[in-house]
């Protein structure tokens, strides 16, 4: 009777076989391979949104500055905007600033695939929004 209990206990204490463990590892690897490209696209969109938000903040604060001073400011500090963006992905600058117009620009600082898609955003005092090299980066959701 004692040996019978040991046999039952041994059967119930069987662990995970190497084959079962390898199957789980393969499944996790396949899931990671499918999820990683989606994660990269999500991260790139988040960086773009950060650049667009900084430029929209420039536009809003430039209008406030203009109402108070009758002229746009060439100084980012006056507008409460810091460069680079929080993630360090885009450098923010003001170009061609006159009393009647300005151009806010965000330039992508990192390399990789994103540099060939949306590496530059611009907004001016007339609310014209441009991007490059792809022209739909302001509205692009993919």
Image (cartoon, rainbow, N blue to C red):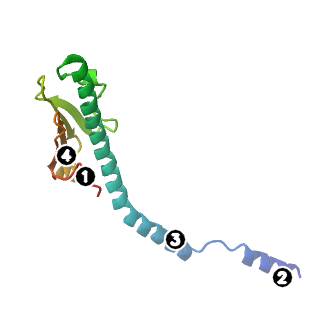
Looking at the image, the residue that sits furthest to the right is: 1
Task: Determine crowd level at label 4: few under 14, some 14-19, many 20+ residues with C-alpha closer than 10 A.
Answer: many
Of the two numbered discs 4 and 3 in the rendering, the one whose residue sits closer to the viewer? 4
Q: Is 123 on the left-hand or right-hand side of 13?
A: left
Mark before the other along the chain sequence, 2 or 3: 2
Q: Which mark is residue 24?
A: 3
Of the two numbered discs 2 and 1 in the rendering, the one whose residue sits closer to the viewer? 1
Dot 1 corresponds to which residue? 139
Of the two numbered discs 1 and 3 in the rendering, the one whose residue sits closer to the viewer? 1
> Mark 2–mark 1 contact, CB under 8 Å?
no
Task: Determine crowd level at label 3: few under 14, some 14-19, many 20+ residues with C-alpha closer than 10 A.
Answer: few
Dot 2 corresponds to which residue? 4
Mark before the other along the chain sequence, 1 or 3: 3
Marks 2/3: CA distance? Answer: 33 Å
Of the two numbered discs 2 and 3 in the rendering, the one whose residue sits closer to the viewer? 3
Quadrant housing the N terminus: bottom right
């Amino acid at each position: 009777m004692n040996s019978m209990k040991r046999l039952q206990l041994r059967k119930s204490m069987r662990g995970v076989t190497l084959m079962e463990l390898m199957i789980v590892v393969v499944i996790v690897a396949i899931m990671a391979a499918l999820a990683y490209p989606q994660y990269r696209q999500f991260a790139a969109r988040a960086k773009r949104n950060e650049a667009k938000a900084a430029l929209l903040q420039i536009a809003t604060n430039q209008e406030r500055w203009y109402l108070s001073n009758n002229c746009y400011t060439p100084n980012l500090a006056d507008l409460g905007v810091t460069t680079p963006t929080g993630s360090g992905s885009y450098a923010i600058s003001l170009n061609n600033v006159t009393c009647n117009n300005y151009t806010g620009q965000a330039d992508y600082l990192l390399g990789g695939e994103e540099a060939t898609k949306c590496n530059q955003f611009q907004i001016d005092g007339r609310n014209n929004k441009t991007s490059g090299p792809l022209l739909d980066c302001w509205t692009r959701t993919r």
